Amino acid sequence: MGKRRIGIVGYGHLGQYLVTQIESRDDVELAFVWNRTRSAVEGKVRDDLILDDLDKFTERSADLIVEVAHPCITRDFGDRFLTHADYMIGSPTAMADPDTERKLRSATNQHGLYVPSGALWGGEDIRKMADRGTLQALKVTMRKPPQSFKLNEPLRSKNEMVKDETVVLYDGPVRELCPLAPNNVNTMAAAAVAAHNLGFDKVSGCIVADPSLTDWHIVQVDVWGPGNIADDTAFHCQTVRRNPAKIGAVTGSATYASFLSSMIAACGKGPGVHLC
């Protein structure tokens, strides 16, 4: 069996990391690298591996296409990628758009759509509970310093007003949060995909600007299962992940290795939507 050919869409910090890792491995090889600005790739990737026109991705015969660019890539190309290859969506916030989610799911009849778990601890357990119908509620809370949030209005202005006190910027359905913080809440989008019996409308997301966090991003996942939530007799599992991160970093450093592991695992599951 030959090496799996992987196409990378996006050449920011994560894209550069993945390209370096692919080139150092014996089990995979680069099919192409695309970036909106070609000059950012020139001199760092062999010319024959640079794809100038993403519409021509089929010419490179990738087995897996990995998006690490922007949610608009999935909106515009996701279903087309899936007609030719497996697709790993690095910005699953794109699936908060109902039309995009519908198109992606309907396009997975030949290839797999892979959603990386990222900072979501226990994603497979959440999915299993959703499969059994025992998952009652799910909430993901992210605490970061204000400089690490990349937000759209009205949350941007609210975050800019944060000084010394901790401020809850948003607390509500993940579907409404995703377009307001598309670069920050991919973990929440992955949770909504795992919790498929709840989906983006019923999974809750909370983002908190905490100026005291100078070295960490904190992700808390609360899961409720069988029992009565109202009188606190339901099954409840809470995990808290402290992800090392510098001030201003959108993504914690541990997420890079996690994403690489997800990319390597994104194969062999066939058609459908899969956590990896």
Image (spheres, rainbow, N blue to C red):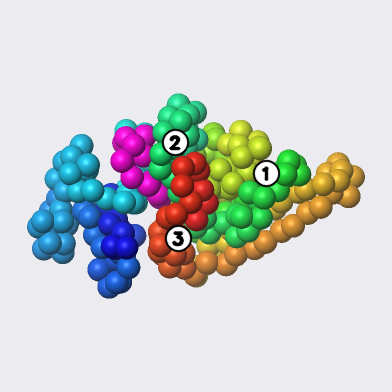
Res. 66 visible in picture = yes
| Residue 193 image position (x, y, % from top left) | 56, 43
Q: Quadrant of residue 199?
A: top right
Q: Is 235 displayed left or right of 10 in the figure?
A: right
Q: CA distance from mark 1 to mark 3?
A: 21 Å
| Residue receiving disc 2 | 109
Q: Quadrant of the N terminus?
A: bottom left
Say whether disc 2 or disc 1 marks the residue closer to the N-terminus: 2
Say whether disc 3 or disc 2 marks the residue closer to the N-terminus: 2
Helix, strand or loop at mark 3 = helix
- 248 or 256: nearer the viewer: 256
Mark 2 and mark 1 residues within 8 Å of each other at the beta carbon: no
Q: Is residue 85 magenta?
A: yes
Disc 1 crowd rating (10 Å Cα; few below 14, some 14-19, many 20+) is: some
Q: Nearer the viewer, mark 2 or mark 1?
A: 2
User: In the rendering, which numbered label is found on residue 166?
Assistant: none
Say whether disc 1 or disc 3 marks the residue closer to the N-terminus: 1
Disc 2 crowd rating (10 Å Cα; few below 14, some 14-19, many 20+) is: some
Q: Label 2 amino acid?
A: Asn
Would you place residue 20 above or below residue 55 in this image? below
Q: Residue at x 67, y 61 (%)?
A: 239
Q: Is residue 81 magenta?
A: yes
Q: Quadrant of residue 81?
A: top left
Residues shaded magenta: 77-91
Mark 1 and mark 3 residues within 8 Å of each other at the beta carbon: no
User: In the rendering, which numbered label is found on residue 131?
Assistant: 1
